[in-house]
Image (cartoon, grey):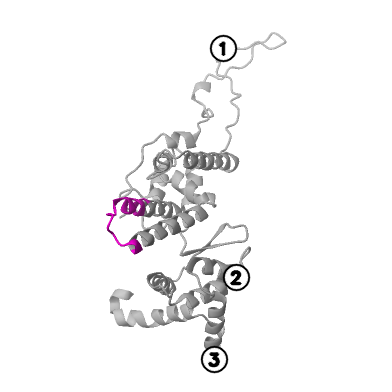
Amino acid sequence: MSATKRSMLSSTHAIFRGLQGSLRQSLRELPDNVPNQLKVGLTNAHRKLSDYYGKIDNSPYYTWASLLDPRISYEGLLADCENDPSMQRDLECSRDQLQSHYHANYVQDPAPDTVSTSSTPSISSSGSQQKVDFTLQYKKRVRAYIDELKEFFKLPQENFDTCDPIQWWAGHHSKFPNLSCLARDILSIPDADYFLFDEADCPVCVILQETWLKMSFWGIHGEILSNEKCFGLEALAEYLVKVMAQKPGLSQERILAQLEREYGGDIAAKLGDWERKSKASGHEGSTFLGNMGEHLMATMPAMMGPLAT
């Protein structure tokens, strides 16, 4: 368990890599007489994770969050590359992009030090001596420029179970005054409940703020993933289309096409049947997941008693 209770992009990145590694290891250790169905299932799971990993990696923020997470940093990501030249090149590219973004938006260039440190009287052009500031040595001087990002990458990784990245950066603000602001902005981006991909094939986060709606969403999503017929997919499609289809780069057609690629079947036809039944039952304009979340919010506290409040 991690010390942080915040869901952040770097954690998603780490979990993806961990799941991929676990599946890869399981495939290597399978005995020869294992049923072929199990091999195919594990291979498909690994392929699906790789597809999603490649998709979310289109956004720089996942890798940037991992680079700025003191539990992972550049050292941890480099170890993930496992001597793969392609992955190493991608990592170097992400690091360079982060450095460019940091220097362009967060580095405050120190003003040139124009103060003379000499206490020796100077002679003016008229031959008279000028005033000397004998307290000059105590006046504040501009600190020499330090590349905070390079200095951060030199530090050893923190323990994943005991380190809270947000608190770590707060405690190191004096050492990294500029970089800590960038880290706070990147690491404060919340993790998503689902990813859609816009017309530029970039990820769009679906983030559910309400607890009971989140529980309903994840319950339905788990049911979809646990059965071959994808029971509940219509409810998921209905909610995503209603809430996300008007977002820039998204549309009903694009969302349904993504769901068809991920789960198979004619989702558009299924959603049409689902909406007709909802209208006939008097639920037009609402969503099944939204109604389910509201029902849980109304009934669960009473069922659970004081512990739910």
Q: Position of residue 142 (x, y in %)?
A: 54, 29
The residue indicated by pointer 2 is: 245
**Pointer 2: residues within 10 angstroms few (<14), some, or many (20+)?**
some
Q: Quadrant of the N terminus?
A: bottom left
172 shown above or below 229: above
The residue indicated by pointer 1 is: 120
Q: Identify which amino acid the numbered label 1 is placed on.
A: Thr
Q: Is residue 6 visible?
A: no
Residue at coordinates 42% horizontally, 40% vertically from top-left? 78
Q: Position of residue 74 (x, y in %)?
A: 43, 40
Whether residue 24 is in magenta: the answer is yes
Whether residue 194 is in magenta: the answer is no
| Cα separation between marks 2 and 1 | 73 Å
Q: Nearer the viewer, mark 3 or mark 1?
A: 3
- Give the farthest residue toward the top: 127
Q: Which residues are magenta?
A: 21-37
Residue at coordinates 35% horizontally, 64% vertically from top-left? 37
Q: Identify which amino acid the numbered label 3 is placed on.
A: Ala
The quadrant where residue 38 appears: bottom left
* Magenta portion: prevailing SS class: helix
Near-viewer residue (287 or 252): 252
Q: Quadrant of the C terminus?
A: bottom left
83 shown above or below 51: above
The residue indicated by pointer 3 is: 280
Q: Secondary structure at mark 2?
A: loop
Mark 1 or mark 3, which is nearer the start of the sequence? 1
